[in-house]
């Protein structure tokens, strides 16, 4: 803003401030749209936990994680922010966040049902 004011006067400062506010509004609207989408989905349910686990990578932001899962995760009783998503087969992905980013995850497979003798 200082540089813009030096080169273009007060009009450049106003233009710069308008640009910054517009970008902030766009980002807020993206997050609101995402939250509206995930609020309608069942908490902690995904279509396929194995496919979700394959798409995870360290440093993934919370909003990107919500886009992948399509819903909010179930809070786990672990130290730090930890959440889980489960599929219909019983497979479960547990993630741990650090500073709003994906720090680690683990896939827990469901025990296969074995037929009786």
Image: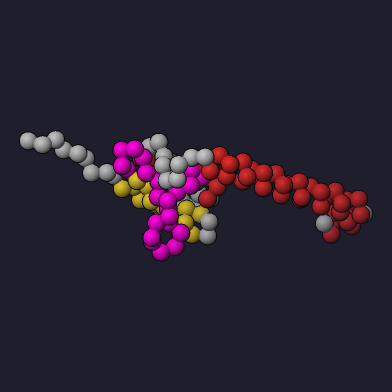
Return the x and y of residue 110 as percentages of the image width and height. 27, 43
- The answer to whether 9 appears left or right of 53 in the picture is right
Q: Nearer the viewer, residue 89 or 54?
A: 89
> Does the rendering let one see residue 46?
yes
Instruction: Specify the segment rendered in magenta.
Output: 65-91
Q: Nearer the viewer, residue 70 or 102?
A: 70
Viewport quadrant of the C terminus: top left
Magenta span includes 90: yes
Q: Residue at x 40, y 50 (%)?
A: 84
- The answer to whether 68 appears left or right of 8 in the picture is left
Magenta span includes 70: yes
Q: Nearer the viewer, residue 82 or 51?
A: 82
> Does the rendering let one see residue 68?
no
Return the x and y of residue 59 as percentages of the image width and height. 50, 52
Return the x and y of residue 22 as percentages of the image width and height. 76, 46
In this view, 12 is above or below 38:
below
Return the x and y of residue 2 as percentages of the image width and height. 84, 59
Most extreme residue toward the bottom, as rendered?
79
Q: Residue at x 16, y 38 (%)?
A: 114
């Amino acid at each position: 803003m200082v540089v813009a004011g030096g080169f273009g006067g007060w009009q450049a400062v106003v233009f710069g401030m308008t640009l910054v506010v517009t970008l902030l509004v766009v980002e807020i609207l993206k997050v609101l749209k995402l939250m509206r989408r995930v609020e309608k989905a069942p908490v902690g349910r995904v279509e396929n936990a194995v496919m979700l686990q394959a798409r995870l990578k360290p440093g993934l932001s919370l909003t990107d994680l919500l886009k992948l899962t399509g819903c909010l995760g179930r809070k786990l009783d672990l130290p730090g922010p930890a959440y889980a998503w489960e599929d219909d087969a019983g497979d479960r992905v547990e993630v741990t966040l650090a500073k709003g980013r994906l720090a680690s995850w683990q896939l827990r497979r469901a025990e296969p049902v074995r037929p009786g003798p």
